[in-house]
Image (cartoon, grey):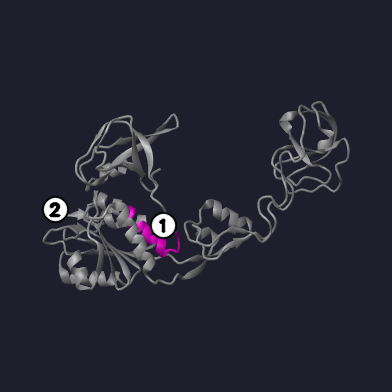
Amino acid sequence: MLSYSDARQKVVEVAGSIRRPLVRETIEIEQAFGRILAAQVNADRDYPPFDRSVRDGFAVRSADALAPGARLDCIGELRAGGSFAGVVGPGQCIEIMTGAGVPEGADAVIMIEHIHRDGRTITLDRAVKPGDHIVPRGNEARAGSLLVPVKTRMGYAEMALAAQAGATRLEVFARPRLAILSTGDEVVDARTTPGPLQVRNSNGISIEILARTGGAHPIQLGNAPDEKAALRAAIERGLEQDILVLSGGVSMGKYDLVEPVLADLGAEFHYTGVAIRPGRPAVFGTCRDKLVFGLPGNPVSTMVTFELFVLPAIDVFSGAAPRPLPIFRAKLATDVHEKGPLIHFLPARIDWQDREARVSQLAWQGSGDVVALASANGFLVVGPEQPDIPAGELADVLPRRGAI
C-alpha cells in the first residue's frame, strides 16, 4: 500500500505521461482568475513610465536640501496625472502628490510630515538625499520585458499586472473536463426527500466545488446504482471527459463494483489503496487514456482524497506545475493519541495567538461526519512514527481549501 506522498507522485507521473494536447482559448481578463496562462504578457512600456513620487510632499533639488532648516520657495502644485510646464530651479520646490511624475529639475521628494509651511516658504525638518521617495522610470519593468510568464496561475496580482500592461484579452489553456459520478443504492439527489435508510448526495456538491476551485470544468453525471450494467454505462459516459471521479463503491463489500467494472473496461490500476485514514480504499487508474479516480464514499474521505490526489492531476492537465500541499507546523492545544500504521487526517481548528499558529483536534464520529468537518478549517496530520503528541508540541496541519 502506497504512502499518500508516493500515491500523489504516481498521479503526477501518470498524468504527465498521457499525451493530451493543451487546448488554448482567449478570454476576457475578468474571467482569468485561477486560469493558466498560455501566452506570456510583456510590458507595453516602461514601468513606471515616468519618475514617480511615492509620497505626498514636495519635489526638491537635493543640492538645496542637504541639512535640516533649509528654506525653499514653493512655486506650484502637481497632482497625480497632472503636469508642470516649468523647471524646479535653485531654491525652489513643487508640492507633489503620491503617484505624480517628478518635475524637471527635482531629484528627490521630502514627505509633507517633515516640513513646516508658511505661505510659499517651506522649511525642511531633515536633510534630503538624491532619489528619496522616487521610483525612477523603468525601475519596475522595461518596455518589452516579461511580466507574466506562460503557465502562470492567474491571481489578482497577476491580473492587475496584465491589466496595467493593457493585456485585457488573455490566452489561457482550456480547463480539463472532469466528470463526477456518485454510486450507491442508498444515495439520492440532494434536492429530494430521502427515505429512512437513504442519504442525500453531498459528495457531488463537494467534488464539483473542489474541481471548480481547483481549475477543472466539472460535469455532473448524477448517481449510479449498485448494479453492473448501469454502473458500466455511467462510467463509459464519464470516460468521454478528461478525468473521471467516482465516489463510493471502492471498498471490499459485495456491492462495491467500481473496480470490477473498470477492470472489465480494460482499466490499468496504479494503486488500489493508500495508507491514510480517512481514505484508505482510494483507487487510481487509467482507462482509454483517461484518468480515473475511485474515492471512498464517506464524505470526509471523499474530500480528503480529492485534495490529496485529484487536484495535482487537474494541475498537470491544466498545463501547470502541481501545487505542493500547503502543510505547515502548528502548536497542539491538547494531547493527541492515534493508533495504527496509517497517516491520519483529523478535522481540526487552526487559529493564531500572538502570531503563533495553534491547532485543536475536533471531536468527530468518523469519515461520514460532515458536521464536524464544516466546523474545521484544517486537518491535523498524525503519522505512525509519532502517534502520541503532547500538548504544546508542534504538529503538521493541512488547511482546508477555502477555509483559511
**Main secondary-structure element of the magenta-colored stretch:** helix
* Quadrant in which the C terminus is drawn: top left
Q: Note whether 318 is above or below 4 in the view shown.
A: below
Residue identified by numbered label 2: 197
Residue at x 80% of width, y 45% of height: 103
Q: What amino acid type should be assigned to the residue bearing mark 1?
A: Pro
Whole-percent x, y for residue 63 in the image: 84, 36
Is 234 one of the magenta-colored residues? no
Please give left or right for residue 125 compared with residue 40 in the image: right
Residue range (magenta): 307-322
Q: Secondary structure at mark 1?
A: loop
| For marks 1 and 2 on the same chain, the one whose residue lies earlier in the sequence | 2
Q: Residue furthest left?
A: 254
Please give left or right for residue 78 compared with residue 365 in the image: right
Residue at x 88% of width, y 40% of height: 89
Residue 374 seen from this side: yes
Whole-percent x, y for residue 261 in the image: 19, 69
Q: Secondary structure at mark 2?
A: loop
Residue 377 seen from this side: no
Whole-percent x, y for residue 147 in the image: 60, 57
Find the distance from the CA under tag 1 to the CA under tag 2: 40 Å
Q: Residue furthest front?
A: 385
Q: Dot 2: within a 10 Å radius of its alpha carbon, few (fewer than 14), some, or many (20 or more) residues?
A: few
Residue at x 14% of width, y 58% of height: 252
Q: Dot 1: within a 10 Å radius of its alpha carbon, few (fewer than 14), some, or many (20 or more) residues?
A: some
Residue identified by numbered label 1: 322
Q: Residue furthest right?
A: 90
**Could you say which quadrant of the image residue 184 lies in?**
bottom left
Q: What amino acid type should be assigned to the residue bearing mark 2?
A: Leu
Q: Note whether 173 is above or below 311 in the view shown.
A: below
Whole-percent x, y for residue 219 in the image: 34, 65
Of residues 223 and 132, the one nearer the viewer is: 132
